[in-house]
């Protein structure tokens, strides 16, 4: 994928995170060098994060929050072990205490400090602060306007929930060799959820949008009205939905957000740590066929403005485009620095952490399947009796076995190659590696999600993107209420 990039601003383009702290960059560098002497790798990660969230529910402002967090995390890596200490006090005394703590991991170990990441002059998002432009009162008034618009659209609207959320994260990453990286990361999300009712029945629909930019694109009337209309459409479709059948069906997945199934059922299994420890269903299969011909899946952190994109990851490695599966063959893993070194591979820019209080690990950025050759209408027409899954809610996956369960929030029966009645309560049940071999047709309509994904792993949440074209997967188990 071709990406447009703009030059990265120098450190002078924003205040250093040492500003106002009882710690100078020179002192920090000296303590860091001593702490990591003899380690294989490690870094000092400093962060300042400002965040806000507004929730308008049931016709009133239910909650509003504005938070500022600041702190550092210090890591020392020795072989397969890592020592980590963090503090919300950025001071010489706190850093010395952290250095003493992480140095213990080097006991009996004498390593050669790894080479620094390559530098980049690329930048994938503006450093603008999304929290600054619009006054708080204007944001509340906008949420009230959206609520009123939604209620006026249809008398069956019973509840409207609208939210705005933004963060502005500044990070500095220092290494013992003097390498220093900075990044300023904006992130916003808008979401609307509607509950519609008819008699005693209640059903919901939702629509969200977001990315690494300011609010402006998402709060134009055309944008938020479109989101309300989509959420309402989903809710009304679900009001007419019948109980989902149970059994084995050929399933057509829609483009875009349904890629979350690939993210969970396949993506986590292609992260380096699970494969190094041989706890992934894909462990030991490099170079082997793991999916149907035509299936190509990539992790791409370089798409400008996308929710999962990063100019550099949380270890300072520039993000990249990593091909994971190519034409059905396993060709790559997503790697942070530690697991890449231990596996004899290169870091791929996937070392991520939730905050300064968390240790980095291999994580996805924007993970998606590339387009194929089939028209989506052709794919639907090819299914005599099946399920068309348009959108998903929550899901679970077991990394070791690859088994997954996903709930559909919008789905339909397919009868005679045509989309028929909507269904509710459909659960897709299967095994990720096995499902990849059951892909029979790949659409030419690859799309990315609208910017709403958050991925959880080992207690850490990070923003991600997902995507895929329309897919036909044969013989998936569907859990429902009718047999």
Image: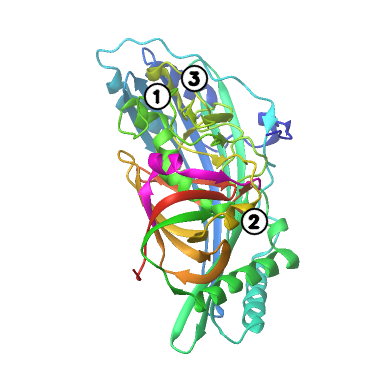
Compared to residue 39, the image places residue 85 above or below, namely below
| Residue 386 is a magenta residue | no
Residue 334 horizontal/vertical position (percent): 47, 30
Q: Which corner quadrant holds the N terminus?
A: top right
Q: Secondary structure at mark 2?
A: helix
Of the numbered discs 3 and 1, the one sitting upstream in the chain is 1
Neighbour tally class for label 1: few under 14, some 14-19, many 20 plus, Cα within 10 Å = many
Of the numbered discs 3 and 2, the one sitting upstream in the chain is 3
Residue 296 horizontal/vertical position (percent): 55, 35
**Nearest the eye: 342 or 388:** 388
Judging by the rendered image, the residue that carries numbered circle 3 is: 346
**Nearest the eye: 25 or 406:** 406
- Of all residues, the one furthest to the bottom in this rendering is 199
Judging by the rendered image, the residue that carries numbered circle 1 is: 339
Q: Secondary structure at mark 3?
A: loop
The answer to which quarter of the image holds residue 101 is top left
Distance in Å between CA atoms under marks 3 and 1: 9 Å
Residue 294 horizontal/vertical position (percent): 56, 35
User: What residue lies at 63% left-to-right and 45% top-to-bottom?
Assistant: 306
The answer to which quarter of the image holds residue 286 is top left
- Residues shaded magenta: 428-445
- Whether residue 57 is visible to the viewer of this picture, yes or no, is no
Judging by the rendered image, the residue that carries numbered circle 2 is: 377
Neighbour tally class for label 2: few under 14, some 14-19, many 20 plus, Cα within 10 Å = few
Residue 472 horizontal/vertical position (percent): 52, 50
Compared to residue 303, the image places residue 456 above or below, namely below
Q: Are marks 3 and 1 in contact (CB under 8 Å)?
A: no
């Amino acid at each position: 994928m071709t990406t447009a990039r703009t030059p990265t601003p120098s450190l002078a383009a924003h205040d250093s995170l040492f500003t106002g702290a009882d710690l100078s960059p020179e002192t920090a560098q000296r303590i860091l060098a001593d702490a990591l002497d003899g380690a294989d790798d490690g870094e000092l990660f400093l962060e300042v994060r400002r965040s806000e969230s507004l929730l308008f529910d049931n016709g009133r402002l239910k909650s509003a929050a504005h938070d500022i967090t600041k702190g550092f995390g210090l890591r020392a890596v020795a072989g397969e072990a890592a020592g980590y200490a963090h503090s919300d006090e950025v001071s010489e005394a706190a850093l010395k205490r952290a250095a003493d703590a992480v140095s213990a991991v080097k006991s009996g170990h004498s390593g050669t400090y790894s080479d620094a990441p390559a530098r980049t002059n690329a930048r994938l998002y503006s450093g603008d602060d999304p929290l600054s432009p619009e006054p708080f009162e204007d944001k509340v008034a906008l949420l009230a306007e959206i609520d009123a618009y939604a209620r006026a659209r249809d008398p069956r609207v019973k509840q409207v929930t609208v939210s705005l959320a933004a963060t502005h994260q500044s990070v500095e990453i220092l290494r013992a060799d003097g390498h220093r990286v900075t990044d300023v990361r904006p992130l916003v999300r808008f979401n609307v959820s509607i509950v519609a009712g008819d008699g005693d029945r209640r059903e919901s629909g939702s629509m969200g949008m977001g990315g690494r930019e300011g609010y402006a694109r998402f709060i134009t009337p055309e944008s938020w009205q479109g989101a309300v209309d989509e959420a309402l459409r989903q809710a009304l479709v679900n009001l007419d939905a019948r109980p989902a059948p149970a059994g084995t069906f050929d399933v057509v997945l829609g483009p875009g957000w349904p890629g979350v199934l690939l993210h969970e059922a396949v993506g986590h299994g292609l992260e380096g740590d699970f494969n190094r420890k041989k706890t992934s269903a894909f462990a030991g299969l490099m170079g082997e066929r793991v999916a149907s011909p035509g299936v190509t899946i990539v992790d791409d952190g370089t798409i400008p403005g996308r929710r999962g994109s990063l100019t550099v990851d949380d270890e300072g490695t520039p993000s990249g485009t990593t091909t994971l599966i190519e034409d059905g063959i396993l060709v790559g893993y997503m790697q942070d620095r530690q697991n890449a070194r231990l596996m004899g591979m290169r870091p791929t820019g996937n070392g991520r952490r939730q905050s300064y209080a968390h240790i980095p690990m291999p994580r996805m950025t924007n993970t998606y399947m590339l387009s194929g050759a089939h028209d989506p209408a052709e794919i639907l027409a090819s299914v005599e009796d099946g399920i068309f899954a348009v959108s998903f809610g929550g899901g679970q996956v077991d990394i070791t076995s690859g088994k997954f369960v996903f709930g559909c929030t919008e789905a339909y029966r397919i009868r005679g190659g045509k989309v028929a009645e909507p269904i509710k309560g459909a659960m897709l049940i299967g095994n990720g590696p096995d499902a990849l071999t059951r892909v029979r047709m790949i659409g030419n309509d690859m799309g990315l999600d609208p910017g709403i994904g958050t991925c959880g792993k080992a207690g850490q949440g990070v923003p991600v993107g997902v995507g895929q074209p329309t897919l036909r997967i044969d013989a998936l188990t569907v859990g429902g209420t009718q047999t």
